[in-house]
Image (spheres, rainbow, N blue to C red):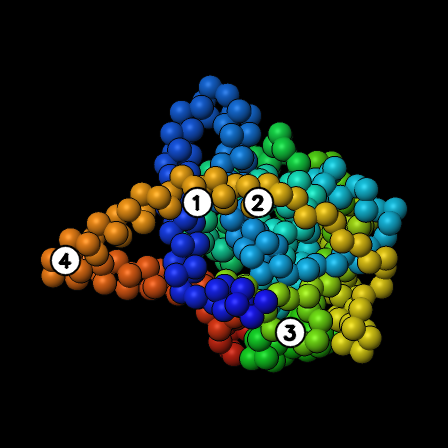
Amino acid sequence: MDLIALLKSQFLCHLIFCYVFIASGLIINTIQLFTLLLWPINKQLFRKINCRLSYCISSQLVMLLEWWSGTECVIHTDPQAYPKYGKENAIVVLNHKFEIDFLCGWSLAERFGVLGGSKVLAKKELAYVPIIGWMWYFTEMVFCTRKWEQDRKTVSESLLHLRDYPEKYFFLIHCEGTRFTEKKHQISMQVAQAKGLPSLKHHLLPRTKGFAITVRSLRNVVSAVYDCTLNFRNNENPTLLGVLNGKKYHADLYVRRIPLGEVPEDEDRCAAWLHKLYQEKDALQEEYSRTGTFPGTPMVPPRRPWTLINWLFWASLLLYPFFRFLVNMVSSGSSLTLASFVLVFFVASVGVRWMIGVTEIDKGSAYGNMDSKLKHSD
């Protein structure tokens, strides 16, 4: 086991994962570009093809979590609601505290067979990130600027386009808007005090307008809200670098299915409903910190083989020419070739570090300065 752990921590393994992900991602992005020709002819065919192309990219990251690191995620839920997961469209409200919480959300979607079509309300800057951002563009992801005057129309229009989407999906929303840090939490609770709202210990104040417009735009298309609260056992602090190093984490995810009919249609009442939901999520986290578990029946959805099969396909397709190229460079013996090899190795290491850095908590968006936050509008 120690030998396997040592192998997983080696940079060469990380370089292989990075190469396969980048090379396959750029190939898939190029194919997606050509699928635009289908849009005016058969929009639904365009969507179905891009769902599967999207899966080829996002499932590689899920493979790292589920197969490489072997991270376990136990779902605590109502057994009567469990059979509906993956059989209906749902809005997933997930807390935003961990560097790999998005990956756990993807893993949830994968376990229930809806990863390819699943959506997220994401900041617009991510649309320009190569591979992932470009993939999201072709799968009609919903982007926002976090400036409500601009987002009111654009987000609503993007959501309305999803009403006739042909695939089942989870629509993931981090209502807190940014990852939890102590500094952001302090500012957020000042905003809560100024608005006369109850304080939260484990969450930031939720931003309600994005959630309200999502509910309004997808009503009668989405069946339920999945209230998801994530935590890790033994005070684990999971990171993408840890996953890449093969470190195994132990996640607990509380999932509560709330029929969409129970969510108010009026914007103000919907906002009040969401604030109440986050107070309940906060109480759940407090209980977890005391007991180490969530309420509900613990279940582990079966791990599907398709993420591993997808990665092995791309690895077998791309690794042979890659290693042949490296061997030719080294065996040539010329100073220019060796210098080029060092440069490629350096660029690859920077690429790995940059991809990891995108997920780091301290690289998250600024919650804003003190003056503006006291006037913060959700």
Disc 3: which residue: 236
Q: Secondary structure at mark 4?
A: loop
Circle nearer the N terminus (3, 2)? 3
Disc 1: which residue: 315
Circle nearer the N terminus (3, 1)? 3
Kind of residue indicated by mark 2: Thr
Looking at the image, residue 201 lies above or below residue 4: below
Residue 14, by quadrant, is: bottom left
Q: Which numbered disc, 3 or 2, marks the residue closer to the eye?
A: 2
Circle nearer the N terminus (2, 1)? 2
Kind of residue indicated by mark 4: Gly
Residue displayed at 84% across by 46% down: 81
Other-residue count near label 2 (Cα within 10 Å), few / some / many at <14 / 14–19 / ≥20: many
Residue displayed at 59% across by 54% down: 67
Q: Is residue 187 visible?
A: no
Kind of residue indicated by mark 1: Ala
Kind of residue indicated by mark 3: Glu
The reply to whether dot 2 and dot 1 touch (C-beta < 8 Å) is no
Q: Is residue 319 visible?
A: yes
The reply to whether dot 3 and dot 4 touch (C-beta < 8 Å) is no
C-alpha span from label 4 to label 1? 28 Å
